[in-house]
Image (spheres, helix red, strand yellow):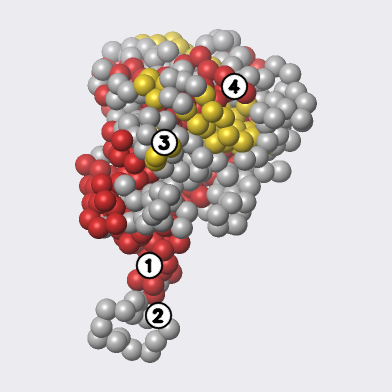
Amino acid sequence: MTSTDQRYGLARTLTLKGPLRLDGGVLLSPVDIAYETYGTLDEEGGNAILICHALTGDQHVASDHPVTGKPGWWTRMVGPGKPIDPARHFIVCANVLGSCMGSSGPASINPATGRPWGMAFPVITIRDMVRAQAMLLDHLGIGTLEAVVGGSMGGMQALSWPATFPDRVRAVVVIASTARHTAQNIAFHEVGRQAVMADPKWRGGDYYGGRDEPASPPAAGLAVARMAAHITYLSEAGLTEKFGRKLQARDAKTFGFDADFQIESYLRHQGIAFVDRFDANSYLYITRAMDYFDLAEEHGGRLAHAFRASRARFCLVSFDTDWLYPTAESRAIVHALNAAGAPVSFVELSSPFGHDAFLLEAPELNRVVDGFLRAGE
Amino acid sequence: MTLRPDLAIIADTVAAGSRILDVGCGDGALMAVLRDAKGVDARGLEIAAGNVAAAVSRGLSVIQGDADTDLAAYPDASFDYAILSQTLQTAKRPDVVLDHLLRIGRRAFVSFPNFGHWRVRASLLWGGRMPVTRLLPESWYDTPNIHHVTIDDFRAFLSDRGITVEGAWFLSGDRRTSSAAANFRAEHAVFLLRS
């Protein structure tokens, strides 16, 4: 493959005529997929690794974010000398369907109206995201993936890969994830969605503006949604260690409703920073896709059946302080894989950082992923 | 790499190309030898996260779990051999673990330190203290070995349950000892069982 091939590199966008048949029954056309690739696809096309991002992630896995200027979201795992290494691997990361970083989503233009889709965008599923990724791989000339790797919602996509395309993936890495959303998971997401929808600026999803009208997104609602969600990504012990009851730049409580506590100030900052880079409607669509996710339900109610046709190796990792997708969820997947006879590794790692641990410095995680990937090379 | 003597016996006996489950596989030393020397399809179960990470990083399929709670998820007869080395005496319910081993594996290897060894007996008889030996190095309060068992206890158990013994090896240090005096002279026993 030559380096001048326009399909490969950073900040690529592919527009496919489609249509893509969605789980909800709608045919989506056209389908935009924004993606990045790192490294070189080998002659046989056998060294490709697909990385799947989480709810508010994007394709900039190891390149600077165009809006925030921050380094890629998983440079601890992806990069020179890391377990997923462009010197060895051809790395692909695509913005998921429904998101807002260049792939088709509610902020994209609806060809029927010439205006953003808004809530007219069809509801999508995790499996729809995976199908869109498969279309991208077709375009890139990748038949079978060496591995698909993802944390959190990325792990849901990674699990869906061998279930949807059993012949197209040889190894699956699922970190801090689950095979289905529980009532509690759905409940937290519903709080976030209602916060967005309760913002008067949401206007039924029609806030993108137009020729005469500036865009006016429901930033307050989305910020609250992010604040609530952010709590679920951290552990109680981690919050206590970092913030405790410490006051924010003051010596005493104000007997008012300013952000007296550091944790309040921190969450407000997280909320405000988030709305600059994320579309509120995308947040609704992607959380919905996660809530609809139940891999067993898609396979006759038995999770083991999801993996029946797959010959892939699996590696699952959970974190002991993750209460969003606790270890028991990973164990349920492991048991199903055992029942299906699949080669599976699983380890619960210790970290004070809760669900977010998979994005943070975790030498043991790197060691496990590195060894697992090398065993297949 | 040199294997522990009980593991070496198991490694010698397992048929090439078979499927094995190593329950309490540690860092995967036996699994790696079986994979590399005999083309065995090896899976492991191990309770300590550090050991699991070490085993996975050498390319082995090992899941973190507990023999007392996680064996139920494995289907019947899904392995040629289920192996339990130096783990029986740490189980909450060794009898249930053995039932699962013989259900999951067509055959089962079980190895354990012999609490009937003369040095153990001497320690209790003359010292009046719970024995601390080379193979049982922990004190009574922090030992993971909560179900001490002698070779004769184990033989009686197998006979009660109608479990077939296809092979038995007895070790004192690195040397084999005879079956007849094993309960007194062997530090260590390895059994190959079939239900």
Identify the amino acid type marked 4: His
Check disc 4 and report its element: helix, strand or loop. Answer: helix
Q: Would residue A104 be found to the left or right of residue A65 on screen?
A: left
Residue A313 in the image, given as x and y percentages of width and height: 51, 23
Q: Quadrant of the C terminus of chain B?
A: top left
Identify the amino acid type marked 1: Arg
Check disc 3 and report its element: helix, strand or loop. Answer: loop
Camera-side mark, 4 or 3: 3
Q: Mark 4 or mark 3, which has the lower sequence index? A: 3
Q: Would residue A220 be found to the left or right of residue A151 on screen?
A: left
Q: Mark 2 or mark 1, which has the lower sequence index? A: 2
Check disc 1 and report its element: helix, strand or loop. Answer: helix
Q: Name the residue under label 2.
A: A248
Q: Mark 1 points at which residue?
A: A268
Residue A18 visible somewhere in the drawing: yes
Q: Name the residue under label 3.
A: A114
Give A150 or A97, whichever is nearer the viewer: A97
Q: Mark 1 or mark 3, which has the lower sequence index? A: 3
Residue A217 in the image, given as x and y percentages of width and height: 36, 55
Q: Are marks 1 and 4 in contact (CB under 8 Å)?
A: no
The numbered disc on residue A139 is 4
